[in-house]
Image: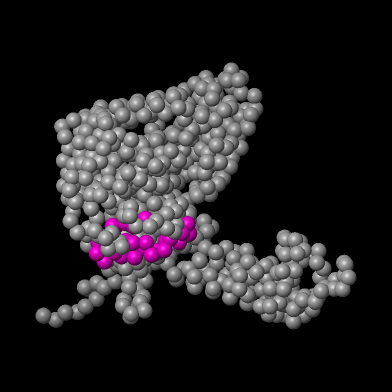
């Protein structure tokens, strides 16, 4: 039966839940229209369908305005349990939870689904249809996936899944600050850093079994020219396939950072000749896991048997979106936790904890491309200088301290003493001189930063500004309509590991800086980044970058607010834990140590 009709039945049964089954209930068509929130014609269609399914009996009153009789053949809890079971069998866990939240508060169905969900997550050993033992890790997320097509990713969660499914030519080792072999087993560059040659591994297979060649690399990277990440390939003059397993990149400008570019997740190599279908055009990769199924709320990854390195220990990883209000309950369970600081009440004293500063920074950006009051530089400066960032840190975890730039790696900190210098700029408080006359200014963010947004709103209202806060979903905030509507956006920039992630924040066409810039400002930023790429000396490179940050603050384009932190906790039996540049744990090396040697008494 159509789930929409079952939903209508629950709405009806809730309205008359005080009546038992098989008891005639007097009602009118107007009453039913109000209960079901649809037209009289649609109400009749619903009633007829529910009668056919033997859920109700209905006898229409004769004549206009006369009362009718409805008899329920099933109670609310019974029907809700059946619908919940059906959704869980289809792995539509989020829909099941939302349904129970709406109709089952305080019922046995609510207790049932909470127990079911709690038992579902974590490490599991199950038998397949062929009676093969499978090891599965299931863990919850509290935000939607937006895409796992490499050329469209921006959010860290999406990028992390991409890094499990696809490979880049080389990899950046976040822990050791160096580049490692990946699809390419060797590489070299010309002295002027304009020509880069890569030698591919032989025998690398895509998930569909086809062998990777240099032609695949060329055509995969060419996709970026038609994507929001085209900034990554703007300097590429020509890509030459020299042989089946060697490929040459010739650049228009010197780029000493080109290895960072080709190791970046959006540059992941796909099978361009395979059809792209499903969730946001799902391509075929070469990574340790292949995608079994994916949508915005649910992703299932299975181990790729023929991965060119070594097969993952886990057979399957299942990622399921849950409502935010279940975060605390779920984090009391043992399994795998990514605590980004929204919840501080969970007791994890029996867990192995690894804590690390997360190079995330809350940023407020100004839409200076939009016609309106924010085109006035003095108004932008007034707004940004009247946000008390010290008070923002007092809102507590996960906020660490006031930010005066994007958080960089320890390597970059050590190389340049100017890193710690502030880019903060102070301006006089004089709103009247800016020409502002009370126009509405919309501040857009997602729920993760709602508390900060309302705090900023209150501070600016006290200074005479008319600030409206709009909270939107993760998968809606990048829409053209939303970006056009926003005067300001509050988001968390996560430039983890190296310069390339910083460049992404400034140049990604669907990000929260680039779309808000005037054409003149875009040209200035591009010119400055080109100079950074050409610079060979690391300390001078960092100095040029810090000058870019200071310039943007002085121009009222953005304000660095507070740095953030992340704590990752996990079950003590979980082995193979290592953090990648996105501060997530790579799945491919994870395994569960269920048996310990001290459980055995061995007589020698």
The answer, for residue 96, to whether it is visible in the render is yes
| 420, above or below 490, in the image | above
Measured as percent of width and height from the top left, residue 502 is found at 35, 37
Residues 337 and 309: in front is: 309
* Quarter residue 453 falls in: top right
What number of labels is visible?
A: 0
The answer to whether residue 345 shows anywhere in this view is no
Q: Name the colouring of the figure.
A: one colour
The reply, left or right, for residue 330 in relation to residue 310 is right
In the image as oriented, which residue stretches furthest toward the top? 433
Residue 444, position as x, y percentages in the image: 54, 40
Quick check: 531 left or right of 248? right
| Residue beneath the point at 24% across and 31% down | 254
The residue shown at (29%, 27%) is 531
**Which quadrant of the figure has residue 42?**
bottom right
User: Image height check: is 378 above or below 187?
Assistant: above
Establish if 173 lies above or below 39. Answer: above
Find residue 529 and report its image quarter.
top left
In the rendered image, the quadrant that contains the C terminus is bottom left
Q: Residue 328 appears at what percent x and percent y?
A: 49, 59
Q: Residue at x 34, y 65 (%)?
A: 302
Above or below, comparing residue 220 to residue 521 in the picture: below
Q: Quadrant of the N terminus?
A: bottom right
Q: Tell which of 332 and 80 is nearer to you.
A: 80
Instruction: Say if the magenta span includes residue 317.
Output: no
Q: Residue at x 16, y 79 (%)?
A: 602
User: Is-magenta flag for residue 294?
Assistant: yes
Q: Residue furthest left?
A: 604
> Which region of the structure is painted magenta?
283-307
> At which x and y percent is residue 53?
66, 78
């Amino acid at each position: 039966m159509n789930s929409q009709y079952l939903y209508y039945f629950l709405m009806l049964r809730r309205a008359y839940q005080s009546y038992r089954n098989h008891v005639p209930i007097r009602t009118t068509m107007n009453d039913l229209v109000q209960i079901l929130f649809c037209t009289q014609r649609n109400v009749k269609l619903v009633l007829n369908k529910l009668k056919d399914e033997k859920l109700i009996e209905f006898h229409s009153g004769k004549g206009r305005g006369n009362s009718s009789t409805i008899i329920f053949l099933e109670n609310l809890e019974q029907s809700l349990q059946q619908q919940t079971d059906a959704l869980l069998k289809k792995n539509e866990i989020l829909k099941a939870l939302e349904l129970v939240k709406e109709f089952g508060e305080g019922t046995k169905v609510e207790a049932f689904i909470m127990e079911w969900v709690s038992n579902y997550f974590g490490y599991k050993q199950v038998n397949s249809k062929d009676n093969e033992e499978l090891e599965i890790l299931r863990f919850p997320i509290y935000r939607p996936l937006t895409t796992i097509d490499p050329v469209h990713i921006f959010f860290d969660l999406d990028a992390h899944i991409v890094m499990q499914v696809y490979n880049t030519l080389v990899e950046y080792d976040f822990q050791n600050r160096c580049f490692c072999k990946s699809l390419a087993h060797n590489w070299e560059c010309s002295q002027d850093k304009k020509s880069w040659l890569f030698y591919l591994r032989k025998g690398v297979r895509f998930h569909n079994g086809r062998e990777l060649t240099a032609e695949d690399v060329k055509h995969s990277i060419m996709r970026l020219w038609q994507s929001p990440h085209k900034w990554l390939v703007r300097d590429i003059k020509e890509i030459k396939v020299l042989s089946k397993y060697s490929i040459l990149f010739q650049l228009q400008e010197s780029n000493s950072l080109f290895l960072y570019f080709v190791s970046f997740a959006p540059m992941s190599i796909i099978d361009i000749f395979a059809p792209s279908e499903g969730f946001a055009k799902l391509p075929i990769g070469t990574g340790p896991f292949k995608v079994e199924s994916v949508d915005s709320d649910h992703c299932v990854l299975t181990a790729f048997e023929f991965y060119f390195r070594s097969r993952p220990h886990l057979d399957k990883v299942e990622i399921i979106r849950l409502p935010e209000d279940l975060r605390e309950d779920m984090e009391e369970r043992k399994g795998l936790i990514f605590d980004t600081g929204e919840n501080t009440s969970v007791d994890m004293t029996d867990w192995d904890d690894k804590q690390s500063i997360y190079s995330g920074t809350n940023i407020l950006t100004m839409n200076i491309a939009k016609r309106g009051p924010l085109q006035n530089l003095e108004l932008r400066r007034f707004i940004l200088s009247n946000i008390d960032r010290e008070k923002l840190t007092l809102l507590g975890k996960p906020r660490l301290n006031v930010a005066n730039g994007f958080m960089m790696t320890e390597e970059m900190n050590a190389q340049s003493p100017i890193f710690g210098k502030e880019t903060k700029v102070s301006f006089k408080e004089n709103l009247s001189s800016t020409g502002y006359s009370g126009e509405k200014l919309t501040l857009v963010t997602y729920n993760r930063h709602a508390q900060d947004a309302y705090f900023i709103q209150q501070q600016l209202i006290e200074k005479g500004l008319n600030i409206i806060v709009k909270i939107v979903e993760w998968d809606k905030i990048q829409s053209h309509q939303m970006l056009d509507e926003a005067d300001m956006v509050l988001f968390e920039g996560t430039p983890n590991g190296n310069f390339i992630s910083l460049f992404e924040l400034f140049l990604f066409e669907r990000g929260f800086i680039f779309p808000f810039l005037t054409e003149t400002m875009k040209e200035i930023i591009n010119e400055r980044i080109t100079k950074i790429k050409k610079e060979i000396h690391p300390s001078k490179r960092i100095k040029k970058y810090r000058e870019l940050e200071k310039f943007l603050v002085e121009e009222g384009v953005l304000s660095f607010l507070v740095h953030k932190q992340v704590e990752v906790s996990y079950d003590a039996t979980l082995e193979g834990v290592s953090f990648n540049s996105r501060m997530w744990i790579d799945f491919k090396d994870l395994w569960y140590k269920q048996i310990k040697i001290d459980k055995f008494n061995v007589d020698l």
